[in-house]
Image: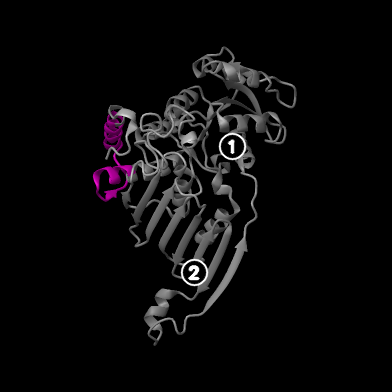
Amino acid sequence: MQNKILRVALIGVGNMGKKYAQMIVSGEVANMKLTAVVIRRDELMEWGEALVNVDGEHVRIFRSADDMFKAEDVDTLFEAVIIATPHKTHAKLAVQAFSLGKDVLCDKPAASDIGEALTMNEAAKKSARIYGMIFHQRLYPKYMKIKSMIDAGELGKLRRVNLINSRYLRTSYYHHSGAWRSSFTGEGGGALINQGQHILDMFQYLFGMPQRMFALIPFGKYNDFAVDDEDTIIMDYDDGMTASFVLTTGEACHEERLEIIGTKAKLLLEDNTLTITRHQDVEEYIKTEMVNSRENMQYTKETIEFPKTPEPYIELLERFARASLEHDDTYLVAKGEEGLNSLMLCAGAYYSACNGIQVKLPIVAEDYSRLMDELIMKEKSIKNNTRRII
């Protein structure tokens, strides 16, 4: 694979799209070259015209994705597409790419609707092309360590998980930085569908999908809009594990806390500090020890500090390139079909909160689509987007 180069097209040149473009044309991403980009806004044309790969090849500019997909040399111009557009456009673009036999790497979330995500998965399967998601946080060393410990059974049976994340403080300036942002109409939701997708993906990557969930969402708690900026979710698993999940984008203090309790160990991750408390199997201890409480319980404690490292986008892109060039999706950081999981958790939370009930997963795509239609209609009918519509 050393001499093979994956020719890619980029659709979406917002903040993240520009970053991906610069990484690729600068040669930071091994075995990948940017050969085409879609630029719709006139003010970005100068930026696009300056995109030149390290071998001197200029990046060809198209004014629409349709124009790019209809190019006479589309068969040879690029082999794969990176989608970094607002997520309500993801499904259409991905299906177009798959229909032309192109591999696809899609930014989060997969889509804004369960039905669209299912359509993307089906199109990928039908085309037999490589389909990946940009869930780069799976490559954080702290999560890789936790994942390896869980998979190796070091924690025993998982019994309880608590997650609190206030990392993503978002201002009114941010919420108004794009007409599509922070709305059911433009995004299909708020914090959960946007910032929460990375966290929800990591949650299901580590612990799997719950069978039942209940959500309490004070829509517009910190902002004058109709979507969520804080979410509290309780999840229930058939094996008896329970979990709580709190995401907020309106708190001043940064907190990333993940507590995992197993029958053989407890993990506490606070930002980049992981504390591991090991002990004998508590289920066996409860059954056999002739004491009232923890008198005979033996503990060992270990603390690991994870240094702050650059966001691992380059590794994710390189692994996509290898997966595409070798037509082997095992190299992907996250397979595209897995994008449905974090979206399903988001849908379950919205459906639960809006109906005031515990829901069973999976949510029926048609039911969720009807809910979104109702929320969009209510959002549009409320003058000045008053705070709560539920």
Residue extending farthest top: 72
User: Which quadrant of the view contains residue 383?
Assistant: top left
Residue extending farthest bottom: 290
Q: Residues within 10 Å of mark 1 (few under 14, many from 20)?
A: many
User: Which quadrant of the view contains residue 114?
Assistant: top left
Q: Relative to residue 184, is residue 249 depicted above or below?
A: below
Q: Is residue 121 visible?
A: yes
- At 65% from the left edge and 55% from the top edge, which residue is drawn? 307
Q: Position of residue 74 (x, y in %)?
A: 57, 17
Q: Relative to residue 97, is residue 217 depicted above or below?
A: below
Front in this rendered view, residue 207 or 215: 215
Please, what secondary structure does the residue beneath circle 2 have?
strand
Please, what secondary structure does the residue beneath circle 1 have?
helix
Relative to residue 3, is residue 176 drawn left or right?
left
**Circle 2: residue type:** Ala
User: Which quadrant of the view contains residue 313?
Assistant: top right
Q: Position of residue 129 (x, y in %)?
A: 51, 31
Residue holding disc 1:
320
Residue stretch in magenta: 350-378
Q: Relative to residue 59, is residue 377 depicted above or below?
A: below
Residue holding disc 2:
265
Q: Earlier in the sequence, mark 1 or mark 2?
A: 2
| Quadrant of the snapshot with the N terminus | top right
